[in-house]
Structure formats: C-alpha cells, structure tokens
Image (tube, rainbow, N blue to C red):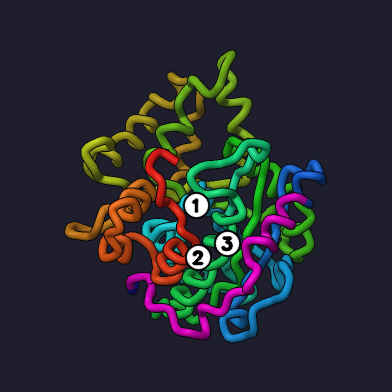
Amino acid sequence: MPSPETNDSPMARLLPPNLVSLFTQALKSYQLSNATFRVLHSLNPSSLHSPPPESLIPHPPDTPLKELLVLDSSFNPPTLAHLRMAVSALSDHNQSSPDNSYKSRVLLLLAINNADKAPKPAAFPQRLAMMYIFAQDLLQSASKIAESKKECEGVDIAVTTEPYFHAKSRAVAESDFYRGTGSAGPIEQVYLTGFDTLIRIFNPKYYPNDSMARVLDPFFAHSRLRVTMRPDAEWGGAAEQVAYLEQLRRGELERVGGRTEWVDRIEMVDGRKDGEEVVSSTKVREAVLRQDWDALKKLVSKGVATWIRQEGLYTQAGA
C-alpha cells in the first residue's frame, strides 16, 4: 500500500474562506437540538476539484453501505498517524469487498460532550476545520491506492455528545443519515483505534456493577474494532500487544466481566514501520511551541500544517 499522500495540489486546498464560522454556527445549531449525533458536512472525490462550498452540506450515502469506517478522535490536531490508519483501512476494505455495489465511506467523529466548556488547546470549530482539511487529505490519498479500483464514496464530518464507544455506536446506528442507504441489513461500523484505546475499552473501572457484558454486547453485535498496534516504551512491542489479545481470548476477558467471543470482532494491524517517525498530537503541539516547522511537516499533512500556522494554533504552553 502506498504511503498517504501529503503533497497537496492547489485544487485540493480550496477551502471556504469562513470555514471556522461555518462550523461555529453548525455547532451552535447542534447543541440546541439535543441530538446525540449529527453529520455536519460531507466531502466526496468530486469536491476536491470543485469550488469550495458556501455552506456546510451533509450528503447521505448514494449507494448501499456494507461497512462504515469510523475514526473517532479528539483531532487536536489530526495527524499523519490518523491518515495512515484510515488509508490502510480503506485499502483493506476495498480488497476484501469484490462487490462493486458496496462503496467505502469514512466517518470522522468528534465527541463534544463537554461542549459547554472551552476546550483546550484548540476550540471545537478549529478542530472541525482541521477535520475538513483532513477529509480532503484522505480522499486524495484514497484515490491513489493502487490496489483498489474503487474510490472512497465520501467522508463525513460529525459530532456527538456521547463519551463512550458503545453509546457512540448506538447513536450512529440509530441516525437517519445512514438508514436510507438500501443496505440489506444493519451497517457494520468498524472503529479505527490505537492499541491504547483497546486497553481502555476493556478496563473494568469504566463498567460499575459488573456491567461490561451488558454494555458492550450491543456494541459488538454490529461493530468491530480495527486496532493499529502502537509499539513503544509504554505499550511494549508488537509481539506483546498481540499477546495481550491472546490473553483476552484465553479467558482474561471473561475474568474482567466481558465475553471471549468479542475477540473475534477485533482485528490487529501493524502500525508504523521501523524507522518511521513516532507521531502523536502531543508531539505536534510540542513542535509548534518550539517553532520547529521541519518537525511539524513530519507529523501532519501540508494542509493541516499550513492551517495551524495560519491560525496561530498551539502557540501557548499549557493552553
């Protein structure tokens, strides 16, 4: 699979001049609605070569969806690690789906459950603006996946007030946005996560009164986890992370209140290769504080890097 494309063409960098204010208004409208999930805007491959929109327009899928790839993150900011996770999933999805009537679609999901408090270090409208740029990056990269003859149909930018995976999954499943796709059955959601998130999902402290099985049964009934391994000093090497999954399979999951069969709904995939830059949102913010623009280019796409500098994001320590 080719590396994600980060050299953005001029056409791909067309942005609405009032992008932050558009998302500010969309966010205010969402908060007044009391909805738990809403798609604010959708981009498709043709949008890369069209004039920037004057308003945010959600576009429900035109064709039946078999799977929805969900990248749930704080996007503070979106990084090249996020891009690699999504491009890898799109590549594998297209190879495993020979039926051309089913198209790939990605949902970028931002949780704003504390939307009444000022989020730091970047406000939610700024994060949504960077998600817009990231969606352009993703569509551009997806179009260059050599193994696939099918394009990613679209990328949706959405918000939710739900803080936990199982509740987010339910909110997406119940949304009218994805219901009218003509799919034969429920759309399977595939959550693209890192290994650290997998650890948290099965931490019993989040499930009082031994409620893990009751809470996660509905989630694993129509959702899967695609876990990108994260070899580092904190989480161990790839072999140790695979061993953790095997421990869950051999009874550890039952011991903490879960079900062993859930492991069959978890896919482990390789993360960064040896010698590749370690990427994290924290490293991005540290690079900006140091004004190390060469380091920043290795952590985020050109478009996101330009936006960060243009908007003066992450310039205050401890902000």
Question: Three-letter amino acid code at disc 2?
Answer: Phe
Which type of secondary structure does the marked residue at label 2 adopt?
A: helix
Quarter of the figure that contains the N terminus: bottom left
Q: Which mark is residue 19?
A: none
Which type of secondary structure does the marked residue at label 1 adopt?
A: loop
Q: Is residue 299 visible?
A: yes
Question: Three-letter amino acid code at disc 1?
Answer: Phe
Q: Is residue 92 visible?
A: no
Q: Nearer the viewer, mark 1 or mark 3?
A: 3
Which picture quadrant has residue 145? bottom left
> Which residue is identified by label 2?
134
> Which residue is identified by label 3?
129
Give the CA separation, mark 1 to mark 2.
9 Å
Name the residue rendered at 45%, 83% in the picture.
9
Name the residue rendered at 61%, 33% in the picture.
217
Is-magenta flag for residue 284? no
* Pointer 1 with pointer 3, Cβ within 8 A: no
Name the residue rendered at 52%, 53% in the picture.
71
Q: Earlier in the sequence, mark 1 or mark 3?
A: 1
* Pointer 1 with pointer 2, Cβ within 8 A: yes
Give the CA separation, mark 2 to mark 3.
9 Å
Give the CA separation, mark 1 to mark 3.
10 Å
Q: Which mark is residue 75?
A: 1
Question: Three-letter amino acid code at disc 3?
Answer: Ala
The boundaries of the magenta stretch are 3-28
